[in-house]
Amino acid sequence: MKLRFVYPAFNRHAEDHPELLDVVPCDEYFGPPSLGIASLAAVTPESWDLDFRDDRFEDVGLEDDIDLVAISTFTPSAKRAMELADAFREHGKQVVIGGVFPSHMPEVAGEHASVVVGEGDGIWPTVLDDAARGELLPRYEATEPVDVNTLPLPRIDLYLDKECDDYHPSDYPVQQSRGCPMKCVACAIPGSLGRRLRPLPIEHIVGQVEQLAARGKLGSLTEDTCLFPGAPQRHTREFVRALLETGREAPVSYLGTSMPLILAADGKLLDEMRASGIRMFYLVGGFDPITRQGFNRKHPRQRQRAVDAIKKSIDHGIEPYTSFLLGNDDDDEGSFDEMLAVADEAGLQKAEFAIRTPYPGTPDWHQMLAEDRILHRDWSKYNDANVVFQPAQMSPERLLQGYLDIWRDFYKSRQNLSKLDARDRTIQF
Ligand code: B12
Ligand code: SF4
C-alpha cells in the first residue's frame, strides 16, 4: 500500500509583505515543517510504502498511484490543505487530514477529508488499517494521551532528504514534551496536544538532537514548558547536563521560552545552558501578563519586568531573540513606540513582530467570537502577518500599518546585523 504525506504551503511575513525584505538587515529563514509528519511516519508499519511531498517547493503529485494521502496542517496552511484534499479526492484518492487546525475545526476540515482530532501517533495504525480496506471513517479522535515513553524518534530524514538550493534550514524542531496544563490566551497546544505536561525521556530528546547533529543540523528546542518551575526545570537541567557531558558545543539553535519564565529561571541553570552551547532564547510574547500589559504605559511594573527579562538573558550570555505580539486589547497606538523604547533600553539586538491572531482552539478565538470581533475566516491570512480581528483600541488598518512601521523602525538602527555570520544574522520572518 502506498502512503504519501503532504505538507501544504502557507505565507510567511515576507511573502505577504515583501517590503520587509528591504528594511530588515537579516536573512529570511525558510523553516522546516512541524514534527507531525515525521512523528506519524515513525509509527507507520513497514507494510506501507511511504513518501513525503513539501508543497512549498515541489509538486504534490495528484496523478500518482497512491492509496492514502495524509495532510498535516496548522491554521496558516489550512486553506491550502483543504484545496489539496479536494484535488486529491477528485483524483480518486483517500485523504486524511490532521494537525492543529483540524483538531480544533474538525467540522470545517471534515468537508474535505477524513479528520484526525488531537495527537495522531496512537490512532494512526487504526487509520491505516481502515484505509487499507478502503473504509476510512469521517472522523477519528485520540481519546487517550500518547505514552511518550513509547515514542520512536521522529523520521526527520524525510525532511532532510528534501533539502535543495532553495530550501536548506539550518535547524529543525526538537520536542521536549507534549501537552500543557496552562491556558494562555493565544495558545492552541493544550487543545491539540492535551492538558497534561508529559516530558519526553532525556534519551529521546538527546536522540532527536543527535540525529540532527549527525546530518550537520541544529535542533530548535520549541517547548516553553521546559522552564516551568519545579519538575520541568529539573528535567531541563538533566537534559542540559547530558549536552554538557558530550564536551562539544550543543548543536542547538535556540530554546523557546517567555519573559516570566526567564525571570523565574534559576540563574545557575541559565549559566549551564550557556556553557552547554545554548546561545539563543526565542522569547515568545503576547501570551503572558508582562508582554500583554507592559507596553501601554499603565503597568510600569510589567514594563520594567520586560526590560529585566531581556537584560537577565543578555547577562547570562544568551541572546534574547524577542517576538513582540501587536494588537493585544491593552495595546493602543502608543504601544509600538513603547515596545521600541523597551527594546532600546534593554539592549535588544534582534526581534520579530507578529500581529495578534485569534487561532481556532485558543481562548482568544472564543473571546473574539463571543464579542463578534472576527473579521473573516480566510485561514490563509491567519498567519500573524494580517489583521483578522477588530482590535480594541485602533482600527485594523492602523494595526497593520503599525506592524509594518515597527519592523522598519526597529531595524533602522540595527543595520549592522547584516555583517554578522550567516547563523547570527538569520531570523524567521
Ligand atoms: C515548529 C513550529 C513551527 C514551524 C513549523 C510550522 C507547523 N507546520 O507547525 C514554523 C517555524 C514554520 C512555525 C511557524 C509559525 N507558527 Co508554529 N509552531 C511550531 C511548534 C513550536 C512545534 C511544532 C511541532 O513540531 N510540534 C510537535 C508535533 C508532533 O505536533 P503537531 O504538529 O501538532 O502534530 C501532532 C498532531 O497535531 C497530529 N498531526 C499533525 N499532523 C497530522 C497529520 C495527520 C494525517 C494526522 C493523522 C495527525 C497529525 O499528530 C501529531 C503527533 O501527535 C508549535 C508548538 C507545538 N509544540 O506544537 C507551534 C505552533 C504549531 N505554531 C503556531 C503558530 C501560531 C505559528 C505562526 C503562525 C506564528 C508564530 N509567531 O509562531 C508561525 C508562522 C508565521 C509565519 N507567517 O511565518 C501555533 C499554531 C496555532 C494554530 N491554531 O494553527 C502553534 C501550535 C504554537 C502555539 N503555541 O499555539 N511554527
Ligand atoms: S503558551 Fe506555553 S505555557 Fe502557555 S498554554 Fe501554550 S504551551 Fe502552555
Image (cartoon, rainbow, N blue to C red):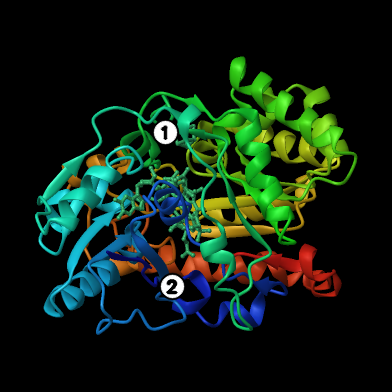
Q: Earlier in the sequence, mark 1 or mark 2?
A: 2
* Viewer-side residue, 124 vs 140: 124
- Look at the numbered disc 1 and say if its residue's Cβ is closer than 8 Å to ligand 2: yes
Q: Could one spot residue 48 in this view of the protein?
A: yes
Q: Could one spot residue 368 in this view of the protein?
A: no
Mark 1 or mark 2, which is nearer to you? Answer: 2
Q: Which residue is mark 1?
A: 184
What's the residue at 51%, 63% (across, down)?
158
In the image, residue 91 lies at what x, y percent?
Answer: 15, 80
What's the residue at 27%, 64% (across, down)?
1
> Residue 229: which quarter of the image?
top right
Residue 23 is left or right of residue 277, and the answer is left
Residue 93 is left or right of residue 409, and the answer is left
How many badges with numbers are in the image? 2
Q: Quadrant of the C terminus?
A: bottom right
Disc 2 is placed on an element classified as strand
Image height check: is 214 above or below 31? Answer: above
Classify mark 1: residues with Cα within 10 Å, few (<14), some (14-19) or many (20+).
some
- What amino acid type should be assigned to the residue bearing mark 2? Asp
- Look at the numbered disc 2 and say if its residue's Cβ is closer than 8 Å to ligand 1: no
- What amino acid type should be assigned to the residue bearing mark 1? Cys
In the image, residue 398 lies at what x, y percent?
Answer: 41, 66
> Residue 83: which quarter of the image?
bottom left
Q: Which residue is mark 2?
A: 54
Disc 1 is placed on an element classified as loop
Label 1 close to label 2 by CB (< 8 Å): no
> Which disc number belongs to residue 96?
none
* Viewer-side residue, 255 vs 405: 255
In the image, residue 203 lies at what x, y percent?
Answer: 65, 32
